[in-house]
Image: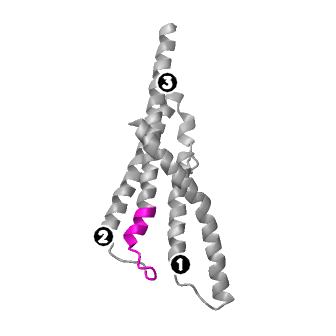
Amino acid sequence: MIKIIKAIKKYFEWFGNSVLNIFPGMLLILTIIAVFNRYFLDYPMSWYEEISLWITMAIVFWGIIHASKNNKHFRINLLMKSLKEREQKYLEVIILLILLLISLLGIYFGIKIVVMTSSKTVVFRIPQKIIILSTMVMGFIGISLEYLYQVITKIKELKQYQNDNYRINIDK
């Protein structure tokens, strides 16, 4: 099972890195073109808002995946420093399980929104379902995969840590 998760995670990493490398530049170029057209050519681009919203949503959700993968998200370690090493490892697993639960709820409610939504974008007439699925739901799926992988690896590390400590105690 870990190999399957690792393979899917690898695809999400590749796609996420592509999104995070290409989309900010696209958003910058589109913004420059939109400002130039609006203020210098007196030609506002009505489609710009739809595309920039989708690109921004994609950057946010794929950025969250990237932050969770590298443990770069905001955290406060007041409690961790006061615990012993073994207790810290248990707390890390509990925190990851809570984060996994929250991301799974994000998938659930994202799908619920998709099912309830029937509107389309104004200019391109793209169903909002596609935008929500391609950004929010896929983002939460990637986050959930990342946290699931981290939970599994932390539990393996915890078992290894317990085995090592058990051997040390027997040797004494």
Question: What element does badge 1 sit on?
Answer: helix
Write down the region rendered in magenta: 122-135
The foreground one among 133 and 75 is: 133
- Mark 3: secondary structure: helix
> Which residue position holds label 1?
49
Q: Which of marks 3 and 1 is nearer the N terminus?
A: 1
Residue 130 on the magenta segment: yes
- In front: label 3 or label 2: 2
Q: Can residue 4 be seen in this view?
A: yes
Q: Which amino acid does label 2 sit on?
A: Met
Residue 10 percent across, percent down from the top left: 50, 45
Membership of 85 in magenta stretch: no
CA separation in Å, label 1 and label 2: 23 Å
Q: Which of marks 3 and 2 is nearer the N terminus?
A: 2
Where does residue 1 sit, x and y in percent of width and height?
Answer: 38, 36
Residue at the limit of the structure toward the right, as seen here: 40
Which badge, 1 or 2, comes first in the chain's sequence?
Answer: 1
Q: Position of residue 63 (x, y in %)?
A: 55, 56
Residue 95 shows up from this direction: no
Element class at badge 2: helix
Picture disc at residue 161: 3
Residues tagged 1 and 2 counted as in contact (Cβ below 8 A):
no
Q: Residue at x 64, y 66 (%)?
A: 25
Q: Residue at x 56, y 43 (%)?
A: 77
- Which three-letter amino acid code belongs to the residue tagged 3? Tyr
> Can you identify the residue that label 2 sits on?
116
Locate residue 18, reporting x and y percent. Answer: 57, 56
Name the residue rendered at 39%, 57% in the picture. Answer: 106
Q: 148 or 38, which is in the foreground?
A: 38
User: How many marks overall?
Assistant: 3
